[in-house]
Amino acid sequence: MGADFSTRAHDALNNPQLRANFRRAMDGLMTKRAAQFEDQDNWNALRARGAAIKARALARLPDLLEEFEQKASANGIIVHWAETTEDANRMVLEILNSHGAKKVIKGKSMVSEEMHLNAHLEAHGIRAVESDLGEYIIQLAGEAPSHIVMPCIHKNKGEIAQLFTDNIDNQPYTEDVDALTAAARQVLRREFASADAGLSGANFLVAETGSLVLIENEGNGRLSTTLPPLHIAVAGIEKLVEKLDDVAPLLALLPRSATGQAITTYVNMISSPRKPGEKDGPRQVHLVLLDNGRSRVYADEQLRDTLRCIRCGACMNHCPVYSRVGGHTYGSVYPGPIGKILTPQLAGLDCAGDLPHASTLCNACVEVCPVQIPIADILVRLRTEAAEPSASTAVKGAGSGHSAVESAVWKGWQAMYANPAAYKIGTKALSVLGNLIPAAAPLLKQWTSVRTKPKFAGKTLHQLAREKGYDNE
């Protein structure tokens, strides 16, 4: 994951163009979302229903996964189970090789980003082309997504215009949005027509019908999943919902929370490959279900709530930290508040233990989450797991942030406040010696690097009270 969060954040905060890009985008998204949920009673009722749907699905997840596999297989979808991203990459590569595929056209998929699938395919001679406009832009830039819904939100029109001029043949520089979109469409239409296989993610998986649900605005997802002869979908095991009726309330929440739309332009339901007599659609559909630590998260009753996430990005749009430093600062596939709780659980606190601390605990993310994930509570839990020298198996890398010195300091603080005599001696000592401690002292330097060292009063409150004659009150 490279440098830690604080180092990357410092660089982002010193980039005025990046901050301006994010501020403009976040303000617009928050305004659009607020307009969709003006009726607070309706919002509260709808998000309670969404939370209940996801909680019910998670409560029955093992059974629903089996039910989904049975229904999907009966429909003609070939289901694969991948424990790790390495397994998932191997499975996708084997499927593509068995069909002689050399080029893949991709719809938007965060799980494929989690797998680093594009790089894996490229290393084995297969070209992957992103068809979502935002993903296409960052692919041209050689960057990772900065947002789970709007991958290139960190770029402005001028930056995108220059990127197109540098990477698309005979493309003149223009900041006209329609012209830029048309230029991308012209390139991508050729890619759709010549692709050997299409790859997508899935917003929801319906156990009752064995269906994949994909929502989008550009039509690229529909083209990626119907035009090539082979369709491969990749999804996390937490995408399950129990019934088809559960999809409608979630569709009423996701687009409005994500982009401020009442509904996306396209809602795709994929339940089978092309059937006899049908004129379009893939001849074969594969689904790779990825675990990658999700079962470990699922095993803990509190941490399981993380898996409710429907990937709307509302928590990012309202986060005072994310909106100032951007998604790349998190150094992981999933940025923002949901990334702060998901990434440390999937990758381990020993790899991403700084992320739970990249939060003010202001609760803005909790207030807007459409499925009521208690993000702040989970952040506190992960901070505790990192600091405790326990043999916990709930979180990978638990105890990796433990400091014997810090632990001793806190135990001393606890002992001082539990004993009146110790408290009296301690506060007296601080009033006399506290101001002599340099701000750069080892125990203080992390705190004082971004704060002014507190000035200790020369007299304690009890001393001042006695001098005023309030000793016996």
Image: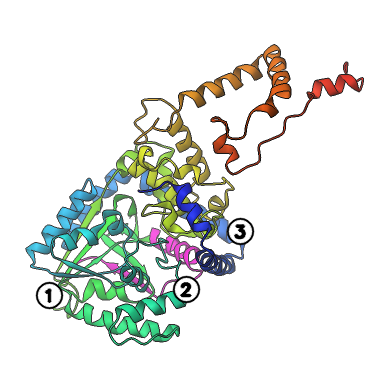
User: For this rendering, which residue is in front, 350 or 299?
Assistant: 350
Q: Is residue 266 magenta?
A: yes
Amino acid type, mark 3: Asp
Left or right: residue 327 compared with residue 285: right
Q: Is residue 422 magenta?
A: no
The residue pinned by badge 2 equals: 156
Place of residue 330 in the rendered image (x, y in percent of width and height, measured from the top left)? 43, 52
Say which residue appears at 41% left-offset and 61% top-offset. 146
Q: Which residues are magenta?
A: 246-273
Dots 2 and 1: beta carbons under 8 Å?
no
Does 159 sit above or below residue 337?
below
Amino acid type, mark 2: Asn
Labels in figure, total? 3
Could you tell me which secondary element the residue under label 1 belongs to? loop
> What mark, if any, has residue 276 been given in the picture?
1
Report whether residue 241 is seen.
Answer: no
Does 455 sit above or below residue 291?
above
The quarter holding residue 23 reads bottom right
Left or right: residue 66 compared with residue 455: left
> What mark, if any, has residue 41 been given in the picture?
3
